[in-house]
Amino acid sequence: MKLELSRVVQGGYRLGVLREIGRASTSSLEVPGCLLYTRCGTVPHLTQDTLHTLSPLPSVTQLTLSTVAEHQEVLEEYKDGFKKFAGLHDTVLYCSLHDPLTPRPAGHVTNKTVSVWGSGGRIELTVGRFMALQKALRPDLYQSMADGETWQGDATSRKRLRKSVDRTLAHLDECLLIHQQTAELQGAEVLGVVEGGDSLEERLRSARETAKRPVGGFCLDGFQTGSMDGPLRTQLISAVAVELPEDKPRLLQGVGRPDEVVACVEAGVDLFESFFPFQVTERGCALTFDLDLSLDPERAGITPSTPVLELELGEELDETWQPERGRDAELEDGAETMTPFEMDLKDTKYRGDFRPLVEGCGCYCCTNHQRAYLHHLLVTNELLAGVLLMLHNTAQYTAFFRALRAALANDQLELFKTRVLRIKRVV
Amino acid sequence: MAAPIDSASDVVASKTSMPSLKSLSAVSPLTLRIIAECPVTKARACDLKLPHSLVNTPVFMPVGTQGTLKGITSDQLEDLGCKICLGNTYHLGMRPGPALIEKANGLHGFMNWKRNLLTDSGGFQMVSLVELSEVTEEGVKFKSPYDGNEILLTPEKSIEIQTASVRLDDVVSSTVTGPRVEEAMHRSIRWLDRCIGANQNPEKQNLFAIIQGGLSADLRKTCLDEMTKRDVPGFAIGGLSGGEEKDDFWRMVTLSTEHLPRHKPRYLMGVGYAVDLVVCVALGCDMFDCVFPTRTARFGSALVPWGSLQVKQKQYAKDFQPIDPDCKCPTCKRHSRAYLHALFKNDTAAMHHITIHNISYQLTLMLSARQSIIDGRFPDFVKNFMRKMFPSSDQYPSWAVDALASVNITLDQH
């Protein structure tokens, strides 16, 4: 795996291509970019046929250990690895520890174990079992076992943070040792996990120590939406980024909101998970980015094709809305609240709206269906609603990253922020 | 009650690349060409020319009650080779309502389905939601389960909702007997006439008359006599598949096909179990619909030539074969029983995989029956089918044995 950066802004974003990913070393992924979120190898609601109406798709698929740990015995008996088991051809497989959307009750991490929550409840993993799972799954890339519990609860003490960093490093050393001895994992890469909660000192120590190990890249853990304030998050990531080698990718876990993504890209993050389109889908909403930066700037935010303005928040939003606003409320709701980048198709105003979700969107849903139909599917609780929304939201989210990269390449980040994120610059 | 085969609105029709069919449909919205008839049984293979595409019969029609086929996109349904599916007047009349469907260029436009649609009148729902309905001569009074408003569904209105077509019937449950059945039958005949009168688009919308009469041979016969006097494009056999004895069921089916005109399509409503389909093809039915294959799929039940396979059962956790190694559907080509078993714990896509497989199973079963009729080997097809479906001949259901014997098929012992 090779990271070729075409552009690095000191203390800021990185633009480039991650090449030769996976054992076949034939795939590449542009950064900043996102992975393809799955549960048990399936993008929620989508069969392979519907998924492949979307193109291009992220070349790396994310599998979460929490959705497959319970099938360990099956996969061990199967022997050919998870990709073949799940009928996934032509994709790079990345395996992370936790599902970003599955709640993880605190208090189940020990010195030697971490726990994941599958459909049948909690599964406790030692490094031995964790690595046995990796051996059965045979991913191209995987996140090393980590103690990521520090962010839960308010009163995390310095001592607990230090312990989490120490444990995570110990797990990494053990993982790497077994990794090197496992024939099935030859050619796969391990991502080291940076912990340290909200302590700058522990974050730096974690980053420095992890960077000393033979890892293929880094997972930044404990920055999840809902667990940390935006400014603190970007401040810590910026500091951590300085300690990490430039030629290895950095994957941020648990952050998916477009405005937060951009802030973290500016702090030096390369890769994101893509659970956000699924969250939007589950609340019956559709992403509605206006990604064309070539438009007359005067029209910014008032183009009729931007249904964001139709939100109740709408009018106020254009004048005064700031991404930081409402953050507190969201912390309480666990990020389930609608963001300003979506339209709520359950709203009766879409009942007779025969326009596509987003004018000009090329996804299967927008080329074949209308808002009124989606509204009908949602109010009648039909399964097709999830299918069509997931297709649309995935298309929009990947297009968002494409537009972001283009904006970075063309020095239009500020314009992108005003136009796409509707962030008014504070004068 | 009547079932209309909805021929689409013009916009949808013009979108499909079938200008010749469109002009044809102005002349006659439906033509039935009999391709082959089984010399032994009453089975027949036909080409049914409908406004949106040619339908090869015998045919199974998947049901999309709310204007959607349970998580399957219209492209997926097309790719499975489905040429005709069902919508439902009662449900769609309630939500989103007739005015909106009309604005969306009919149900075809609303759900973006370019092939044929058959819309069913509210009849069956009158049975299943009987506590919500009151039947008068004028029509059926429903209480909307969604907002509690009273809605009167008249034969005329049901035709209007269907912009395409279906007709309103008075249906009684097939297990109800006595004067109520007779009353329903007569009312259905009167309502058929009102439907025919209300159909503004006879050149584009095919109104099927629905034969009622419960389980009484006399009433069925009266209904058949009356309805076959009307010049409708096709006939539906209704009022069955409501939990009646199978012995009564097949006798009513065969009585109906006996008296229906040869040159018009026969649609047996609500039938979808594989054995029922094969037997009723032998009895001379052309078209079938049922929610069973798609509903059972959502519970993890996959249809196979030997019955069904419950994917969620533990025994499949380590079974790395496809659901049916001989099946050519997208699910069987890509996924194993073990993967589907695991996926059922995580995501709705597992249901979609089984739904795809089950629709494919039903369509393929009818295609194989058709081919065997054309090849003149339908009786062998039936015997093979039954042999695969039942581990031994003493498990053959006696009604199926009797029904098949009535059309000269004697099943083998094994």
Image: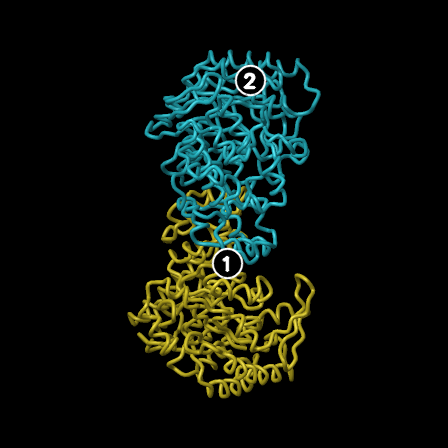
Residue A305, percent across and down? Answer: 49, 47
Does A399 sit above or below residue B105? above
* Label 2 sits on residue: A168
B250 above or below A263? below
**Residue drawn at x 71%, y 20% as measured from the top left:** A155
Viewer-nearest of discs 1 and 2: 1
State whether discs 1 and 2 lie on one chain: no
Figure colour of chain B: yellow
Q: Which mark is residue B38?
A: none
SS of the residue under disc 1: loop
Place residue A6 in its image quadrant.
top left
Q: Of B28 and B263, which appears nearest the observer?
A: B28
Please identify the quadrant where the C terminus of chain B is shown. bottom left
Residue B350 shows up from this direction: no
Q: Could you tell me the amino acid type at mark 1?
A: Thr
Q: Which residue is mark 1?
A: B68
Q: How far apart, in angstroms, are the residues tagged by discs 1 and 2?
A: 49 Å
State the hue of chain A: cyan
Please tell me which residue lies in front, B369 or A214.
Answer: A214
Amino acid carrying mark 2 in the image: Thr
Chain letter of mark 1 equals: B
The spot of residue A79 in percent (x, y) is 41, 33
| Crowding at mark 2 (Cα within 10 Å: few <14, some 14-19, many 20+) | many
Q: Chain of mark 2?
A: A
What residue is drawn where x is 61% and y is 71%? B127
